[in-house]
Image (cartoon, grey):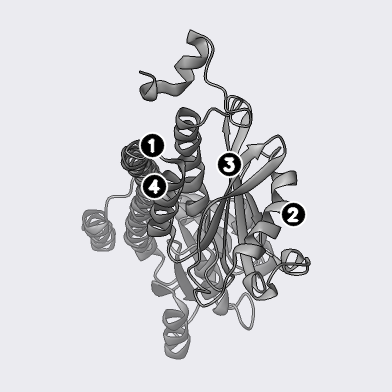
Amino acid sequence: MKPNNNIDNSTSKQADHTKTMPEVEGPASVLLIAPQGTNSDVIGGCVRSSGHRCTPVGSLDAARTALSTSDFDLVLLDTTTHDDAVSFIGEARAACPWLRAIAYSRESDSEGTIEAIRVGATDYMTLPESLEDLPGRIGKVVAQGRSHRRREQKMQRLMDACETLRASKDEMSQQVDVLCSDLASAYRNIKDQMSTVEMTTEFRTLINQELDVEDMLRTTLEYILKKIGPTNGVVHLREDEGKYGIGAFVNFEWQDRNIMPSLEKLGEVLCGPMQGEDALMKFEDAQSFANHDGVDPDLFEDSEVVSFTCNRNGNCLAIVTLFRSSTTPFTDDMASMLDALRDILAEQLGRILRVYKRSTNEWPKDAEDEADWGDLAA
C-alpha cells in the first residue's frame, strides 16, 4: 500500500505553521465580517478550531455595533461585504489603535491588497483558498496587536505616573511658594518691627535729653522731617482747658512768608475737633482749611494734611499737624511711624509739663504730684 503523500505534505505544512506561529497569550477574539453564504461558516469554523473566539457579523453596521460593545483583537474582513468595505479598517483602527485587521477576498486582487494595506490592514489573504494558512496568520497578527496594546498600556501607565508626579510637583511647588511667601512676610514683619524698635529708641534718646518744652518740640519736628521728608508742620500745645497755642513749627515751603497767623487760625479751627480724636487723621483735600478767614490759602491748596494728638493719662497734651503738597502724599508707612512716635512724645511731654497745674502755677502739694515730675523732682 502506497503512503498518502498528500496527507503527509498537509501534516508537514501544518507542523511548519504551528512551529512558526507566534505565542499568543490566551485565545484571540476575532470579529468576522462577511456576508452570509460566502464561506463565512467555513472560515469561522477554522478560526474556532484554532482555539480562538469568533463573532461573525454580516454587515458593517453590525460590525460597528459589535466593536462598540465588545473588545476584539482582530478584524477578519471580506472585502466584498460592501463597496467601501476596506475603509472600515481605518475607521476601526482609529477607534482602537491596537486592533489588527486581515482583509481577504475569494480571488487574488492586487489593487485590493494595496488599498487594504494602505488603510491599515496588517495582512491580505485569498480565502478559502489559503484557509490552511489562516491560523498562522491570525497568531502572528494577534501577537503584534497584543504587543502594541501592551506598549500602549505601559505608555499610558507612564503618562499617568508622569501626570501624578507633575501634579505632586505643582502642589509641592505651590506649597514651597506659600512657605517662601510666609517666610518673606515674616522676615519683613520682623524687619519692620526691628526698624520700629530702633527708631523709637533713637527718638526717645533724643527727646529725653531735652528738658525744655520748646526745644523738645523742635527736636521732634526735626526728627519727623528727617524720617518723612520735606514737610511743613506745627505743634499746638495745650495751654488751658480747650485752648491750644503754638509750641513749635517748621516752615519748609514758604520761608519768605510769615505763616504764624495762618497757623494760629489753623489751631482755632482744628484743635477743638481733634482733641477728642485718638486716631491719626488724614485730610486728602485741605481746601476747607484754605477757605477759612485768616488762613493764607496758598498754604493748603492742593495739599494733604495729617494731624494727630499726643495723649497722656486721658489728657490731650498736644496736637501735631503736618501738611505738604499732594504731589508727595503721606504714605501708610509714614502713618505707622508717626503712630509709634506720638506715644513717646506724649510720654516726654507728661514728664516735663504739669498739665493740671500749669494755668495756676502751683507746685505739687504731695508726693503723688511730685512723682509727675519724674527725673526733675529733687
Q: Give the SS element for disc 3.
A: strand
Q: Return the x and y of residue 100 as percentages of the image width and height.
A: 43, 64
Instruction: Please tell me which residue lies in front, 303 or 31.
Output: 303
User: Gap in Å between the C-alphas at discs 4 and 3?
Assistant: 41 Å
Residue 185 vertical position relative to residue 18 in the rendered view, above or below: above
Q: Return the x and y of residue 45 as percentages of the image width and height.
A: 50, 54
Q: Which mark is residue 318?
A: 3
Q: Give the SS element for disc 1.
A: loop
According to the image, label 4 marks what residue?
181
Three-letter code, disc 1 = Leu
According to the image, label 2 marks what residue?
269
| Residue 195 falls in image quadrant | top left
Q: Are marks 3 and 2 in contact (CB under 8 Å)?
A: no
Question: Which of pointers 3 and 2 lies earlier in the amino acid sequence?
Answer: 2
Front: mark 3 or 1? 1
Question: Which of pointers 3 and 1 lies earlier in the amino acid sequence?
Answer: 1
Q: Give the SS element for disc 2.
A: helix
